[in-house]
Image: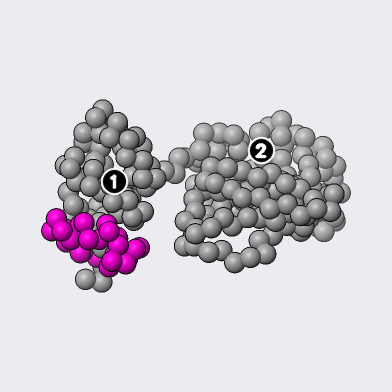
Amino acid sequence: MDRLPLVTSAIVNVAQDVDEPWPIEVIGHDGKAYNVTMEPGEMVLYESHSVIHGRPFPMKGRFYANIFIHFEPTGHSLRHTAKLEGIKTDVTKQYKESVVNKQGGHEHHEDGLPSYIKAGSDEASKWKRSHPSNQRSAKKTTYTTGSTEAHTAASAGDVESLLSLIDKKKDIVHKKDANGWTPLHEGARAGHVEIVKTLVEKGADMNVLTGHDEGEGESALYLAIQEHGDDHPLVEFLESIGALNVGPEL
C-alpha cells in the first residue's frame, strides 16, 4: 500500500512490448483479488493507500511504460510542514487562499515557488519566467518531441493511417522530430516491415540517420538489428535493398 499522503493514485499505461499481459493485482475492500490488465492509453484509478496492490509476477517482454499520478488530502503537506516546523498558522485558510490565487495549493510557498525548487537558483528564475505572477495555471513552456502523426502511425504499425497522411502531405516521410528521428526510424525500431517498405516506396531515404548533425546518428538498419537481431525479417528486407548499417559503434 502507498504511504501517506498518497491516498489515491492513477496509473496511465503509455506503451508496452510484452509477450503476455502483465496485470496489476488489487485486493479490494471486499477482500477479493482482482487482476487488471491495461493497454496503451488506458488508466486505472484506485485507492492506493487503503488497498493492497502490486504485480506479483515478473514481466515477460521488453518494456512496460507507465505514468503514475498521486493525490493527497487537501492541505496535507501544509499541515505536515507546519507541524514539523512549529509554524503557527491556519494552514487550511492558507491552502484556500493559494487555490484562489492559482498558486498550487499544498505546494505553494510564500515566494510562489514549488517546494522542490530552491529559491535563488537558476531553476527558480526559469520557473518564474514561465509562471507570471506565480500562477501555476499560467501557460507553461511546451515540451514536445516534435513528432508528427506519421511518427505515431509508423511506431504503431498502422499502414493505412500512414498512407493517408502521406497522401495529404508527401514530405511528411522526411520530417524529423526534436531528436532527429524520422517515421522510418520509428518503424524500424518497432520492427514493422510493411511500414518500412511503405516509407521507402514513398520516397523515404533508407539510409537517413537520426540526429540533426550531418554524418552522425543511427540508420534504420542499425536500429532494426539492435532491437530485433540479425535474423529479423525487417533486417533481411533492409539488407536486400542495400541499406547501410550505420551507428555510433560502427
Numbered label tally: 2
As drawn, the label of residue 103 is 2
Please determine whether, in this image, residue 114 is positioned above or below residue 131: below
Asked if 200 appears above or below 83 in the picture, the reply is: above
Task: Residue lying at the far left in this picture: please name it.
Answer: 242
Foreground residue among 198 and 143: 198
Residue sitting at x 21%, y 56%: 237
Residue holding disc 1: 195
Residue visible at 56% across and 63% down? 59
Q: Which label's residue is closer to the chain start, 2 or 1?
A: 2
Q: Residue at x 67, y 40 (%)?
A: 104
Outermost residue, bottom side: 249
Residue type highlighted by circle 1: Ile
Q: Which residues are magenta?
A: 224-247
Give how far across and how far down residue 52 sits, in percent.
77, 57
Taking depth in this image into account, of 36 and 151 the one nearest to the observer is 36
64 horizontally vs 233: left or right: right
Q: Is residue 240 magenta?
A: yes
Q: Does 122 sit left or right of 4 as displayed?
A: left
Q: For this rendering, which residue is in front, 174 or 54?
A: 54
Q: Distance from label 2 to label 1 (Cα)? A: 46 Å
